[in-house]
Image (cartoon, grey):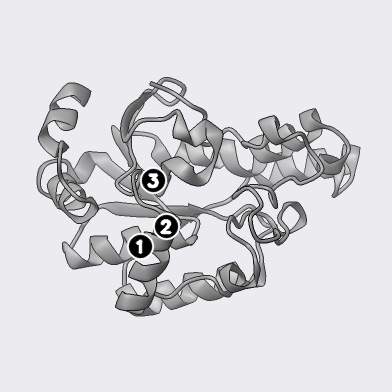
Amino acid sequence: MIADIRRDIAGLDAKEILAYLQQHHTAETIFSTSFGIEDQVLTHLLYEVQSQINMFTLDTGRLFPETYYVWNRTLETYGFPIRPYYPQTQEVEQMVALKGPSSFYESVENRKECCYIRKIEPLQRAIQGYKIWITGIRADQSANRHDMEQVEWDEANQMIKIHPLFHWTLEEVESFLKKNFVPYNPLHDKGFPSIGCQPCTRAVAPGQDFRAGRWWWEDQSKKECGLHATSK
């Protein structure tokens, strides 16, 4: 299946890729949005191709107020149902009871535990039963992501991942947003290129790495939560 998809979408632009998935793989495809600028571009393109592909988001319980703002604006603008997935209450309660609400600052292991409970486990529920996962990943977001491919096999989740904007630059994304009046998170205008949970995200200086503001207290090489581990 993955070989067929690679062949079929070779040379297609992002909108054409989404139209292809809508036409041939609607029921088995899902799109995840965190309401970042890349995901907002994809939401707009899915609207343009009259997509019926299911959409979801992960609400970790620690998001910025601005993220909820753009979530509402997205619903108002496009009318797509966006299903939220939340952490298991018992798991969060146990972690916080034993380690406190800010344990993720204390070690990489604690941070990965928090990411697993708040993001990875809900993700696994969200994608269950689907064969294709659309993401907003771009190659130049980080060194880890540069090693990915536009269409790849996700071994951990046993599904195909497709990144329609993989070859887009940041400038192309920002230009698309402005040209098409796409709602986006106002934090992007305040030095936040990558927006996750509020306690784990801060603004970056001009010229800093795209993900320098995520888990800034950790070594650069560890800055992935596990949602998008490099896979082939």
Q: How far from the left and from the top, in percent, is residue 184?
A: 47, 71
Q: To which residue does mark 2 refer?
A: 38
**Residue at x 63%, y 52% (from the top left corner):** 60
- Which disc is residue 78 wearing? none
Q: Distance between the Cα atoms at labels 2 and 3?
A: 9 Å
Q: Distance between the Cα atoms at labels 1 and 2?
A: 5 Å
Quarter holding the C terminus is top left
Is 47 situated above or below 143? Answer: below
**Residue at x 24%, y 39% (from the top left corner):** 28
- Pick whichever of labels 3 and 1 is earlier in the sequence: 1
Q: How far from the left and from the top, in percent, is residue 23?
A: 10, 48
Q: Secondary structure at mark 2?
A: helix
Foreground pick, 179 / 232:
179
Q: Contact, CB < 8 Å: mark 1 with mark 2?
A: yes
Which residue type carries mark 3?
Answer: Thr
Q: To which residue does mark 1 refer?
A: 41
Which of discs 2 and 3 lies nearer the camera? The answer is 2
Q: How far from the left and from the top, in percent, is residue 124?
A: 48, 35
User: Furthest-front residue in view?
Assistant: 207
Quarter holding the N terminus is top left
Question: Viewed as shown, does residue 222 lie left or right of 3?
Answer: right
Q: Secondary structure at mark 1?
A: helix
- Pick whichever of labels 2 and 3 is earlier in the sequence: 2
Question: Viewed as shown, does residue 101 lie left or right of 202?
Answer: right
Q: Contact, CB < 8 Å: mark 3 with mark 1?
A: no
Q: Distance between the Cα atoms at labels 3 and 1?
A: 11 Å
Mark 2 closeness class: few <14, some 14–19, many ≥20 residues within 10 Å: many
Q: To which residue does mark 3 refer?
A: 135
Quarter assignment of residue 161: top left
